[in-house]
Structures are given as C-alpha cells and as structure tokens.
C-alpha cells in the first residue's frame, strides 16, 4: 500500500497531468493544418496505449484513508480543466472558422480531434467532479457536460446507473452479444428518458412537479443553450455546426467507454424484482498504467462502483480473483468495440468464464441476455 505521505507528493500526481499537453497539441494542429490534424486522435488513443505497453500494469493501491488535504495536486487537475477546455473549444471555433489555410475537410477532421479530447478527457473529468460533495466541483462538472450537449448524463449516472447497474433498468449496462452499433442508439434514447424520469420521481417524493425550479434539467437546458448561442456568435453557422459535431464525437467516446465498462456483467436476480448488491465483479477492471493516467483511474471501475465517492487517486485495484480483467486499456478496447465480430470473439468467452466462476447455479441466461428479468423494485 502506498502511504499517504507519498500519495501527497506532486511527483506522484505528475503523470496524471499528461493530458493537459493535448491542449497545446490541438493548437499546433490547427495552426499547422494538413496531416498534423491527425495527431490529436493518434496521440490520445495510441500514445497512452504505447505507455501501457512500456509501463505495464499499476497494481499498487494508495492508502484509501489518505486525507483530502493531501490530494491537492490531483484535485487541481480536474478543477483547472473546465476553463482550459472552454478556452480551447471556443477559441478553436473562432480560429478555425477564420483560418484560410484550413479547408472544409480539415476543419471537420480538426473538430473530430477536439471531440476526442472533450469526450475522452472532458467527460471523464466531469464524471469525477459530479461525484463530489463540493457544489463548486459539481458545477464545473455540469459546465463540462454542457460543452458536449450531454448534461443529463449527470442525472443518468447518479440517479440511474449507480443504483441499477447490471439490471434491466440500467440502459448503460451493455447486454451480452449486444454489438455497440445496436447499443449506441438504444442508450442515447433510453438514458435521456430514464434520467428525466429519475429526477421527476425525486421531485414527486417531495410533492413537487417536474417543472419545479429545483429540477436540474432547467440548469442543463440553460447551460446547453448558452453554449449553442456562444458557438453561433463566435463562428456563425459553421461554428455552430463544428460545435455540435465535436459534441457528437465526445458523446460517442463516452458511450463506447460505457459499453466496455459493464459488457455482459449482470447482477443476479433474487426473485420478485430483487437483485443482489453491487460488487466489484460487476465491472470490468483494467490496471494499465498509461491509460489510467489518461483517464484518471477510471479503469479501476470495479472500485468506483463499490465506493462511488472515492476520489480518483485513491481508487483501488482488484486482482483477477476479485474482478474480471480487460486484456487492454480502454482506448484499445473501445476500438475493438467498433468491430462487433472481433469484440464478440474476444469478450464473449470472458463473459462465459465470469458466469461460470460467479454464478454456476444459473442455468438459463436468456432473461439476462435479453434484459427480460423483472425491473428492480
């Protein structure tokens, strides 16, 4: 176990600052144009996977009782990122819509790269921020999500996913044999509906209508509208189009990660709409060093669901005896998810091994595969 005195050192936090270098890279790509534009997705997806190959696995765990005062350099990353991303995103809209050296295709490819950054880094950081008790951090998380037009993700994640993960009531839990290209449209539709219903139900328990001012959807809509207006004011119709395009790419990045995180892993139905408690083995774990720097330990997902309020530097790694392991970090796994036949060939045997290990008593998996078990009460 890594003691708190070591966890608190800046040198220990420094590798998690590597994603900040993607922002000056984005400006280099915009100014240079041409093939340089391809560097953003290449560096984001592949460079950190190369670091995985070189650095191997990080299985050491920080002392989970490390006080929050010792986590300054880790918190600083997530708090600084929203204004940096805001300046980069809208600065890029202003620059690209006025740059004579970038043609239409280059502009589109440029904002594909921007979407990779706002999705891979921005949404991951918003996920960390939304789980905190500090209201200012939660607001920063909302601002990041508004920049990709996916504000309802906070309600869906906190009010639905963490409560119902691994059950038919969670849209984000990818079903066994469900290809990503079927999962994606389903989750886009169902997560928006389920998040709104969850907030409406919360208000109803307080005898309040969904139109009450405390409904966070009013904040979501206002922030998203402000982002749309700003994109139009800065870049006109072209700027608005580029903004929406990067938002779509970011959402795709998020949902393909969601697809990977719980693919085929279900909680046992105990009967009468009751399900077992969430355990570490209901999430895929990945302890690859480089991509966990990129994704601030998001790949230690088994512990995140076990202790959702634990800050990212304190998330614990689980061995293969405690949780199922991914063969690669998220970037390579998400690329594999784009090819359903390859994905099934790699992951279906792992799901079957998982079922035999944890639930040998279940003989009929069809209701789990099809999401046909009763909804949790």
Image (cartoon, helix red, strand yellow):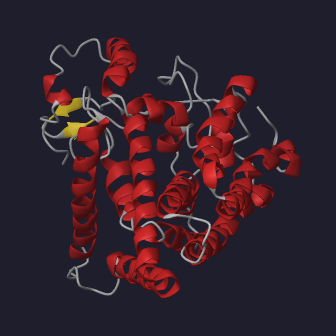
Q: Is residue 207 above or below residue 334?
A: below
Q: Is residue 171 above or below residue 322?
A: below
Residue pictured at 22% horizontal, 47% vertical: 169
- Residue 128's spot in the image, x, y percent? 56, 56
Residue 82 appears in which quarter of the rendering?
A: bottom right
**Depth check: 92 or 289 in front?**
92
Residue 241 left/right relative to 93: left
Residue 27 appears in which quarter of the rendering?
A: bottom right
Q: Is residue 327 above or below residue 158?
A: above
Q: Is residue 343 above or below residue 46?
A: above
Q: Quadrant of the N terminus?
A: top right
**Depth check: 277 or 72 in front?**
72
**Depth check: 183 or 208 in front?**
183
Residue pictured at 68% horizontal, 30% vertical: 50
Residue 340 left/right relative to 182: right
**Depth check: 143 or 182 in front?**
182
- Residue 364's spot in the image, x, y percent? 15, 17
User: Is any part of residue 239 visible from this angle?
Assistant: yes
- Residue 151's spot in the image, x, y percent? 40, 68
Residue pictured at 57% horizontal, 62% vertical: 129
Residue 357 left/right relative to 371: right
User: Is any part of residue 284 visible from this angle?
Assistant: no
- Residue 99's spot in the image, x, y percent? 61, 73
Residue 4 left/right relative to 241: right
Residue pictured at 35% horizontal, 66% vertical: 152
Q: How many labels were placed on the picture?
A: 0
């Amino acid at each position: 176990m890594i003691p708190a005195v070591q966890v608190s050192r800046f040198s220990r936090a420094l590798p998690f600052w590597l994603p900040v270098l993607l922002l000056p890279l984005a400006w280099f790509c915009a100014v240079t144009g041409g093939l340089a534009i391809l560097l953003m997705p290449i560096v984001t997806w592949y460079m950190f996977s190369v670091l995985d190959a070189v650095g191997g696995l990080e299985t050491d765990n920080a002392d989970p009782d490390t006080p929050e005062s010792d986590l300054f350099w880790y918190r600083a990353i997530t708090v600084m990122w929203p204004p940096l991303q805001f300046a980069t995103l809208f600065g890029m809209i202003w620059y690209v819509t006025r740059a004579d050296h970038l043609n239409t295709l280059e502009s589109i490819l440029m904002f594909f790269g921007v979407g990779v950054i706002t999705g891979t880094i921005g949404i991951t950081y918003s996920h960390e921020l939304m789980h905190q008790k500090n209201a200012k951090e939660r607001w920063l998380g909302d601002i990041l999500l508004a920049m990709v037009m996916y504000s309802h993700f906070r309600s869906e994640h906190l009010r639905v996913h963490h409560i119902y993960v691994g059950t038919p009531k969670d849209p984000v839990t990818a079903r066994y044999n469900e290809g990503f290209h079927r999962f994606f449209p389903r989750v886009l539709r169902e997560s928006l509906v389920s998040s709104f219903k969850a907030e409406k139900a919360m208000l109803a328990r307080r005898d309040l209508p969904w139109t009450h001012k405390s409904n966070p959807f009013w904040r979501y809509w206002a922030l998203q509208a402000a982002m749309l207006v700003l994109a139009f004011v800065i870049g006109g119709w072209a700027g608005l189009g580029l903004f929406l395009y990067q938002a779509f790419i970011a959402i795709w990045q998020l949902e393909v990660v969601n697809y990977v995180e719980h693919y085929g892993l279900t909680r046992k139905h105990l009967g009468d709409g009751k399900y077992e408690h969430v355990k570490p083995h209901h999430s895929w774990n990945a302890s690859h060093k480089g991509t966990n720097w990129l994704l601030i330990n998001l790949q230690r997902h088994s512990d995140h669901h076990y202790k959702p309020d634990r800050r990212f530097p304190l998330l614990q790694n689980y061995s293969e005896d405690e949780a199922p392991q991914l063969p690669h970090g998220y970037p390579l796994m998400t690329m594999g998810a784009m090819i359903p036949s390859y994905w099934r060939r790699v992951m279906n045997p792992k799901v079957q091994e998982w079922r035999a290990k944890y639930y040998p008593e279940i003989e009929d998996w069809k209701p789990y595969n099809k999401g046909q078990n009763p909804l949790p009460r």
